[in-house]
Structure formats: C-alpha cells, structure tokens
Amino acid sequence: MRIARSIGPATVATVVILLLPLALPEALLTIYIFIGLSTMVVSGLSLLMGFAGQVSLGQAAFYAIGAYSAGLLARDLKLPSLLSLAIAPAAAAAIAYVVGLPLLRLRGHYLAFGTLAFQLITLSLIGEARDITGGDTGLTAIPPLGIGPLLVEGPFKSIVFGYLAWGLALLSLLFNARLVRSRPGRALRALATSEAGALASGVPVGRYKLQVFALSAAYAGLAGGVYAFYVTYIAPGSFPLVRSIEFLIMATVGGLGSVWGSAVGASVVFLVVQILQSLGTIPGMPLRAPAVFSYAVYGSILIGIMLLLPQGVIPALRSAFRVPSSGSAKNAEPGTRNPEPV
C-alpha cells in the first residue's frame, strides 16, 4: 500500500508535466512555467520553515541572485548558457551560507526581519551597480538558453521551458522527499519539533540549519536562472518584497512540512492572484485595482488558512482521507510541531 501511494502521485504528476506543455496555449503556458518556478522556490522554503523551523522573508533575494548570476555570466563573460544556469544555484547557496552565519543566530521574528533586510540590501546593491547590472534600467539582451548552436528560441521556446521548469521542480520535490526520510531528515523533524530537544539528542543544530538555508537558496537561485533565460530581461522590479511574501503564503497554503504541498500552494495562490488581477483590468476599474487585489488576496488567503486549515491543504486532505500514522502531527504532544515527510 505504501509503495502504491508513493508511485500513484508521482505517476500522475509525470503525466501532467508531459502533457500540459503540449496542450496549453502560449498565455497559459507562461503561467504554467511561472508556477513551476514558484514551486521550486517554495519547495526550499517549505523545507526551511517546516522542517528546520527557520522563517525567511528573503527568498526573492536568492531568486534575484540566481537570475543575475546566470544572466551576467552568459552575457558578459560569454559562458555557455547551461554552465551559467548551473552556477546560478551555487552562487545563491554560497551567498546564503555566508549570510546565514550571522543571520541564523537570530530566532523567530528577528530572523524574519533579518532576511527581510537582506532582500532590501540585495535589491539596493543591484540597483546601484549600474555598470554591472544595468541598475534600475535592468539587465537586457540575456542570451537564449541552449547547447552549442542549438538554441531554445522560436515557437517552441515556451514548451521547452515548460518541461525544464517543471522537470526541475519535480526533481527538487523528489529530492526533498528522499531527504526528509533520511537520517538528516529525521534530525530536521526533531529540530522543527524542539530545537533544545534536538540539541540535547546530539543533532548539530547550527550546521543543519545553515545547510538547509543554503539548500533553500540554491532552489531559489536555480529557479531565478531559468527565469532569466526565459524572459531575457530582468530588473530589480522583477523581484519585489511582495514576491517573498508570495512565496511564504504559497508554502503556508500547501502546508509547511509537506513536501508535495509546495506544488499545490504555488498553483493555488498563483492562479487565484492571476484571476483577480484579470478582474482588476476590466474597463472602469481603478488603475491600481490589480495591485490592490493582489495584496487583498494574499492577506485573505493567509488569514483563511490560519483559521480553517492551520496545517495547510495537503496535511488537511491527508487527515481527512486516512488515519494518521503514529508519527503524525495529530499524535504529537500539544504545543509541538512534527511535520510529516510528504
């Protein structure tokens, strides 16, 4: 039964990933790609918050670091685009490791404010480095993704990026699923339940928190690299603070500590926001209606999830359709968190 449960969702996800890029029109395919990129970022954030118990309001900064790293390496240093894309997550992870050394000494809302400050500093530095990044004008003429003379452009560009974005997103989810079932994953779940208890059990808490922080940044950096090659133009305005809040809400909706909830949360929030933004462009609506709708839906979704589904969509569905195992959150002691690995 356990094998069937694990194979079923993976098979369905694979079939959907293979069919949708061929079936969707261009406009919807673009949304499909952005949801895949968001899933990648949120998968790392869910791992960081749900399993390591660390709050981050700066994931969009690592998204930007990955995008600018890939774009600058390919455009200015003339590196092969695939190599530039591979370096993007490494650059984001390296910066996260350095920044995380002092930041992860903070806890709770202090850490949240620290990561928020990091994003603001990152965007400010990008805007000021005009000779390198193009400043507020943005980085233009990013070369197309490709291998040698084979470039991803033309009428099939979005189809290829659809497979790329969701293929990488699925790999990140599968890696997370394996990770949380491994020995380090069990240590992370202990860390999420009680940091003091994990430390007393011999878990290297500081090292694990730093490694997960860097891993979540790598996911965001990889998504940012794909984004840069897809849109071929990036600017500080492409990575606003609200993007980090959006990623946080996606992770919360899907369920912190739920691996597959990342895809559900990203899909639900992104689609709802797109629908409301479309309503905001109806003739007669105020010019700021799309932005107001976006902020309103973020707040409404977050409040609704906290009140009705405090564990997120996936854990709620799991609880509704089957009896929780002995290690599930329902059987944990009151006041503790015990995230499930799926």
Image: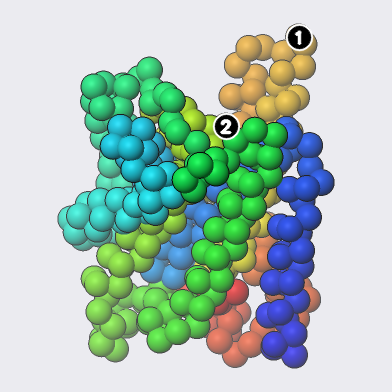
Disc number placed over residue 338 in the picture, else none: none
- Which residue corresponds to the image point at 50% horizontal and 83% vertical from the top-left? 181
Which residue has dot 2 on it? 295
Label 2 crowd (10 A; few <14 / some 14-19 / many >=20): some
Spot occupied by residue 134 in the image (x, y as percentages of width and height): 32, 22
- Which residue corresponds to the image point at 64% horizontal and 28% vertical from the top-left? 293
The correct choice, above or below, for 306 with respect to 57 in the image is below
Give the residue furthest to the right: 23
Which residue has dot 1 on it? 284
Q: Amino acid at mark 1?
A: Gly
Q: Classify residue 277 as left or right of residue 75.
A: right
Helix or strand or loop: what does disc 1 sit on?
loop
Label 1 crowd (10 A; few <14 / some 14-19 / many >=20): few
Q: Is residue 35 visible?
A: no
Residue situated in front as seen by the camera: 256 or 243: 243
**Which of the image's four quarters has the C terminus?**
bottom right
Helix or strand or loop: what does disc 2 sit on?
helix
Q: Is residue 155 visible?
A: yes
**Which of the image's four quarters has the N terminus?**
bottom right
- Which residue corresponds to the image point at 71% horizontal and 79% vertical from the top-left? 7
Distance between mark 1 and mark 2 Cα atoms: 20 Å
Q: Amino acid at mark 2?
A: Tyr
- Which residue corresponds to the image point at 49% horizontal and 48% vertical from the top-left? 147
The correct choice, above or below, for 231 with respect to 319 in the image is above
Marked residue nearer the N-terminal end (1 or 2): 1
- Kindly indicate the quadrant of the structure image that contains residue 260: bottom right
Spot occupied by residue 52 in the image (x, y as percentages of width and height): 39, 68
Residue situated in front as seen by the camera: 22 or 188: 22
Spot occupied by residue 152 in the image (x, y as percentages of width and height): 57, 41
